Image (cartoon, grey):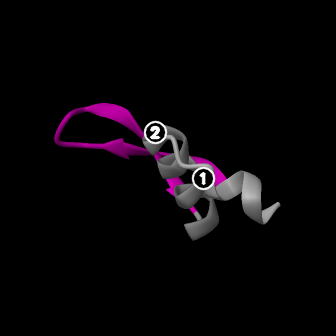
Amino acid sequence: MFQEVSAFCPKANRKVRSFDMSRDGFTLLVMGYTGSRQDRLTH
């Protein structure tokens, strides 16, 4: 549901890291922080 992506940033002169995330991955991440139990009800 998510994948790490890295690229070289010439302005910072270093490798930077980010994550590509699907809508489902984002929803699960947000539900974990808000304390919602929606994910338990749908699975």
Mark earlier in primary sequence (1, 2) = 1
Local secondary structure at mark 1 = helix
4 on left or right of 18: right
Determine which residue is flagged by label 1: 28
Tell me which corner region of the image, top left, top right, bottom left or bottom right, holds residue 39: bottom right
- Residue furthest toward the left? 11
The answer to whether residue 15 is visible is yes
Q: Residue at x 56, y 69 (%)?
A: 23
Tell me which corner region of the image, top left, top right, bottom left or bottom right, holds residue 43: bottom right
In the image, what residue type sits under mark 2? Tyr
Q: Is residue 1 above or below residue 19?
A: below
Question: Magenta region: which residues?
Answer: 1-21
In the image, what residue type sits under mark 1? Leu
- Residue furthest toward the bottom? 23
Local secondary structure at mark 2 = helix
The answer to whether residue 1 is visible is no
State the image coordinates of residue 13 (x, y, percent, origin top left). 25, 32
17 on left or right of 3: left
Q: Residue at x 53, y 57 (%)?
A: 26
Number of marks in the image? 2
State the image coordinates of residue 36 (x, y, percent, origin top left). 54, 49
11 on left or right of 31: left
- Residue furthest toward the top? 14
Q: Residue at x 29, y 43 (%)?
A: 9
Determine which residue is flagged by label 2: 33
In depth, the one of 21 and 27 nearer the eye is 27
The image quadrant where one finds the N terminus is bottom right
Task: Characterize the magenta stretch by its predominant secondary structure.
Answer: strand
